[in-house]
Amino acid sequence: MNTATAATQAGVTIPTIRTWCRRGVIAAIKTAGRWIVDAASLAHRIAIGAMRTTRKEATVTTDHNALATEARELADRLTPKRGCHPADRKGGTRDRASGTLRARGHAEHAAALFDLADKAANPAHPDHEWAGDLLNFHATRAGHITFNPATQGYGLASAELDKARTAAANIRSIG
């Protein structure tokens, strides 16, 4: 069969079939500048691809309330013991306190973003539009070009929670 027929049968592009022919992924011979593909070899390749794509995808069910609670608890655990530390002042050294405050800031920000995402996802909430506008602002600052607050707000909050977790883990290494 020719490359166009093989591409249609395999559900890939013609250049992909040509690449498979050149690399020997499928059995084919070149006659008069055109590839003639062996049907049995192509069927075998399609079967291999089907085996790879039939794996069960892990379904991730996210409990946004649990993540928001985790962010709040992390912020509470990272409360500094005293007031202003030398690391917080201009010219201060990087120490355990500066990492604690950085991690706490990310955790508090994540908790606030989860609250905003809850409001943005609920059109009946009185602060729905305001929360969406504020999430759009945060998304723009984070580098998002297009952003839907109702569907992507939780993703933005989860990313901030990941930053808080990373910063909290780094505190122990600074020690």
Image: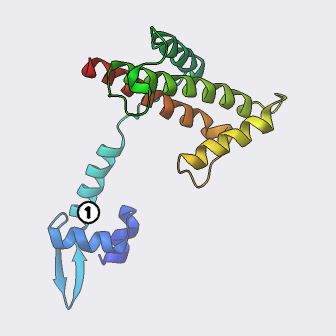
Residue at x-position 23% and y-position 56%: 44
Q: Residue at x 41, y 31 (%)?
A: 58
Residue at the bottom extreme, as displayed: 32
> For the view shown, which residue lies furthest in the top direction?
81
Residue 37 visible, this orientation: yes
> What is the crowding at mark 1: few (fewer than 14 residues within 10 Å), some, or many (at least 20)?
many
Identify which residue, 150 or 15, lies in the foreground.
150
Q: Which residue is at the front of the view, 106 or 133?
A: 106
- Give residue 122's position: percent from left, percent from top: 76, 30
Residue 56 placed where, x, y %? 38, 33
Looking at the rendered structure, the kind of residue marked 1 is Leu
Q: Is residue 105 left or right of residue 29?
A: right
Occupied quadrant, residue 130: top right
2 and 161: which one is in front? Answer: 161
Q: Quadrant of residue 95?
A: top left
Name above or below for residue 140 compared with residue 36. above
Q: Is residue 61 visible?
A: no
* Residue under numbered circle 1: 42
Q: Is residue 147 above or below residue 62?
A: below
Looking at the picture, does residue 128 appear above or below residue 69?
Answer: below
Q: Nearer the viewer, residue 105 or 87?
A: 87
Q: Which of the image's four quarters has the C terminus?
A: top left
Q: Residue at x 46, y 9 (%)?
A: 82
List x then y, in percent, for residue 139: 59, 45
